[in-house]
Amino acid sequence: PISRRLHNSPRALLLFATACNHIIELLAPWLILFPVRFFQIMFGTLHIIFQLTLIASGNLSFLNWLTIVPGLWCFDDAALLGFLPEGLAQSLASAVANASTPSRSMNSQLCVARVFGTMRDIFAVPLIIWLSIPVYTNLLGPRGGARQRMNAAFSRKLLVPNWALGLIRKFCR
């Protein structure tokens, strides 16, 4: 890990890294909700680069390796083919192209899946905004967050891991 070197970086670089951290953690996740391939690939790339940077710094390495997996889900088959050697990519692409064309019922199922996916995204945005209000209130509170309290604005019932662990303990007794 290069944590010591990063810790002793010039102030300007640390401020830039903090700004990048805020952009990647607060703004970039919204890209995944856009049903446009470019935005999803852009989020996946930013997410994986960010996690690899954290791994290189020695910060929560194991969890960051696990957190790369959702970033990989943002890449479709065509994007992932770009990472393979050319010969293998061409043979896989031709195998996919030669596969049977989807039937009418499959096309209607894809249409229904798209509609439900879009509805899920439309309902997810207001839910995320509503659940984020206490977080932003804590972050931007009085005097620009000068009195920010770590995790104080979160309801214990909304913290899923604690809630889930409580249920697991209850049922495992």
Image (cartoon, grey):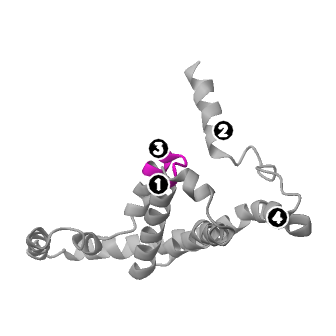
**Residue 79 seen anywhere in this rendered image of the structure:** yes
Q: Earlier in the sequence, mark 2 or mark 1?
A: 1
Q: Earlier in the sequence, mark 1 or mark 3?
A: 1
Mark 4, residue position: 137
Is disc 4 in contact with disc 2, using a CB cutoff of under 8 Å?
A: no
Q: Amino acid at mark 3?
A: Phe
Name the secondary structure under disc 3. helix
Give me the residue at 19% from left, 74% from top: 102
Q: Amino acid at mark 1?
A: Ala
**Residue 116 seen anywhere in this rendered image of the structure:** no
User: Any magenta on residue 122?
Assistant: no
- The overriding secondary structure of the stretch rendered in magenta is helix
Measured in 3D between alpha carbons, the distance from the residue under mark 4 to the one under mark 3, in whole angstroms, is: 31 Å
Image x and y of residue 89, in percent? 14, 71
Mark 1, residue position: 56
> Nearer the observer, disc 4 or disc 2?
4
Give residue 136's mark. none
Mark 2, residue position: 162
> Nearer the observer, disc 2 or disc 3?
3
Mark 3, residue position: 62
> Nearer the observer, disc 4 or disc 1?
1
Name the secondary structure under disc 1. helix
Measured in 3D between alpha carbons, the distance from the residue under mark 1 to the one under mark 3, in whole angstroms, is: 11 Å
Measured in 3D between alpha carbons, the distance from the residue under mark 4 to the one under mark 2, in whole angstroms, is: 22 Å
Question: Is residue 164 depicted above or below 146 in this figure?
Answer: above
| Quarter of the figure with residue 106 | bottom left
Boundaries of the magenta span: 57-65
User: Any magenta on residue 59?
Assistant: yes
Question: Is residue 103 depicted above or below 158 in this figure?
Answer: below
> Nearer the observer, disc 2 or disc 1?
1
| Quarter of the figure with residue 127 | bottom right
Name the secondary structure under disc 2. helix
